[in-house]
Amino acid sequence: MQLSDVPEFIEPNYSSWDGATHGPVPRPDWVIPDLAAIDTELGVLKTGKEADVHLVRRTAPDGRESILAAKRFRTAEHRMFHRDAGYTEGRRVRRSRETRAMAHRTTYGRELLAAQWAAAEFAALSRLWQAGAPVPYPVQLAGTEVMLEFLGTPDGVAAPRLAQCRPGAAELADLFEQCVAAMRLLARAGLAHGDLSPYNLLVHDGRLVLIDLPQVVDLIANPQGAEYLRRDCQNVCAWFMRRGLVSAEFEYLFGDLMAEAVAAW
């Protein structure tokens, strides 16, 4: 989709910045915090079982513009996180009523789960951004919506996923090194992506960027943390090896990352 494809009848709204939880400071220069800014829906970038990603243009009163990706987690009967239990081990909510509602998947409980996953992704992105990890800047959190930095061209074409790329030998080796560096940074923070694959790694102007982090796993608090990290290593190494990078050995990478996590802990 390109911005030229957007119909003219879309009704803009005032920016949702007011009342939202904001991303870490210092903020990038392109972030528009003006309360009088206008948000215009530009269409759907991606649909998924658990969330949809929409393209939004935010325009300040002085004419400044930024393109944002609005990730909206599905609620109630429209979605189901079929892998909640394993990923959320080690996470807690304060009130027993909320715990029971989420455990029994009531309508209220499933709405709580959607907000919990949105908050988890926003918190993970904020933490990792501040640590210097290659992730989109988290602009704001409002309920079940996370507003993110859009990675793509100014006319609204999203950066390709790693799975869509066919890099040459030199670029392949460089992308793998970037991936390892990103995973190493997460491990030092005691985290694993938890669902890492070539489908949630973007390549933007030669830079590898991690996306889709609502299921980020605490390697220490989660009893299955090591297994999620092992699977992350298998997924990315298998892709790079299929493309001809023989040095992408997942057992070596997994052992190295676990050592990093233990040393940092």
Image: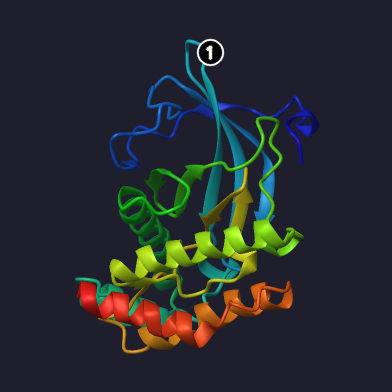
In-front residue for pair 18/180: 180
Residue 82 in view (yes/no): no
**Residue depicted at x 41% and y 79%:** 87
All told, the count of numbered labels is 1
Taking 164 as reference, is 14 left or right? left
Give coordinates of residue 29: x percent, y percent: 41, 26
In-front residue for pair 232/85: 232
Rendered image coloring scheme: rainbow
Identify whether 20 is placed above or below 190.
above
Taking 263 as reference, is 8 left or right? right
Identify whether 103 is placed above or below 178.
below
Q: Quadrant of the C terminus?
A: bottom left
| Residue furthest right as drawn | 5
Q: Pointer 1: residues within 10 angstroms few (<14), some, or many (20+)?
A: few
Give coordinates of residue 135: x percent, y percent: 46, 52
Q: In which quarter of the image is the N terminus?
A: top right
Q: What residue type is labelled 1?
A: Gly
Identify whether 184 is placed above or below 128.
below
In-front residue for pair 86/38: 86
In which quadrant of the rendered view does residue 5 lie?
A: top right
Give coordinates of residue 76: x percent, y percent: 51, 67
**Residue depicted at x 48% and y 18%:** 60
**Residue depicted at x 54% and y 22%:** 65
In which quadrant of the rendered view does residue 22 lie?
A: top left
Identify whether 211 is placed above or below 34.
below
**Residue depicted at x 70% and y 64%:** 163
Q: Find disc 1 in the rendering and name its residue.
A: 63
**Secondary structure of the residue carrying numbered label 1:** loop
Residue 259 in view (yes/no): yes
Taking 245 as reference, is 185 left or right? left
Give coordinates of residue 63: x percent, y percent: 53, 13
